[in-house]
């Protein structure tokens, strides 16, 4: 997959990450959709940087930083975690798919997870379709689970097992090769 990589989030990346996270097309698809202040963002980083159940990464492609991949509720003992991601507004076409591959590879090959979970607000059809095409299995629907301040929205839970990743991995690599 070329020179795509995940590197631990560092303090010097925070303002760049904040600009991506505050982009309307990103924050509109998150549980916390308000515009995040610099102080709030710095406080979040200080509170979470040493949390053993959380890992935050910068995703780079060909040396260009263009997204964030994060794991939450990480349990090495149970070998499970949740994950999420977002890309820069100007990230190249195919970045989301590449980030998904990088996250899955890290979860199963580096962290040795048995299962990786994620949740998507039901109106985010692009990410839902991408997860399904990647091999995630839809495991549940949480009706009216997320309230955005005006409306309730369903949330869809997805999961993938390590054994499923081994089966899905070659097809995802082929899809990425076609995207470029």
Image: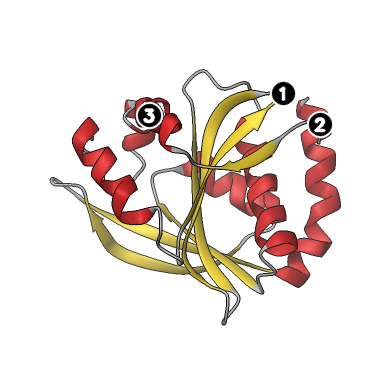
Q: How dense is the environment of label 1, judged by Cα within 10 Å: few (below 14), some, or many (20 and up)?
A: few
Q: Residue at x 60, y 76 (%)?
A: 79
Q: Is residue 98 above or below residue 155?
A: above
| Marks 2 and 3, the one that precedes in the sequence | 2
Label 3 vs label 1: CA separation? 24 Å
From the top left corner, tell me how far across and down residue 154 is, in percent.
33, 58
Q: How dense is the environment of label 3, judged by Cα within 10 Å: few (below 14), some, or many (20 and up)?
A: some
Check residue 2 in the rendering and tell me which mark sits there, or answer none. 2
Q: Residue at x 66, y 74 (%)?
A: 114
Where disc 2 sits, the SS reads: loop
Q: Is residue 74 at all visible to an observer of this figure?
A: yes
Label 1 vs label 2: CA separation? 7 Å
Judge by depth and name the residue closer to the eye, 52 or 122: 52
Q: Is residue 35 at all visible to an observer of this figure?
A: no
From the top left corner, tell me how far across and down residue 41 is, in percent.
27, 39
From the top left corner, tell me how far across and down residue 142 is, in percent.
35, 67
In the displayed structure image, the side of residue 156 where residue 94 appears, left or right: right
Locate the N terminus by quadrant: top right
Q: Which residue is mark 1?
A: 62
Q: Could you tell me if the residues under marks 1 and 2 are in contact, i.e. CB atoms within 8 Å?
A: yes
Q: Residue at x 41, y 66 (%)?
A: 141
Q: Which residue is mark 3?
A: 25
Judge by depth and name the residue closer to the eye, 102 or 77: 77
Where disc 3 sits, the SS reads: helix
Q: Is residue 116 above or below residue 121?
A: below
Residue 15 occupies quadrant? top left
| Marks 1 and 2, the one that precedes in the sequence | 2
């Amino acid at each position: 997959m070329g020179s795509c990589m995940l590197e631990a989030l560092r303090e010097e990346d925070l303002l760049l990450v904040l600009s991506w996270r505050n982009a309307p097309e990103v924050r509109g698809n998150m549980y916390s959709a308000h515009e995040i202040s610099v102080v709030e963002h710095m406080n979040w980083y200080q509170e979470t940087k040493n949390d053993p159940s959380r890992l935050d990464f910068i995703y780079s492609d060909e040396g260009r930083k263009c997204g964030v991949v994060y794991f939450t509720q990480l349990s090495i003992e149970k070998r499970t975690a949740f994950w999420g991601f977002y890309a820069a507004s100007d990230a190249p076409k195919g970045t989301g798919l590449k980030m998904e591959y990088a996250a899955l590879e890290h979860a199963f090959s580096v962290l040795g997870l048995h299962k990786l979970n994620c949740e998507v607000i039901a109106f985010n059809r692009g990410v839902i379709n991408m997860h399904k095409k990647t091999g995630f299995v839809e495991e549940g629907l949480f009706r009216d689970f997320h309230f955005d301040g005006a409306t309730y929205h369903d949330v869809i839970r997805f999961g993938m097992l390590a054994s499923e990743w081994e089966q899905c991995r070659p097809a995802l690599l082929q899809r990425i090769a076609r995207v470029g």
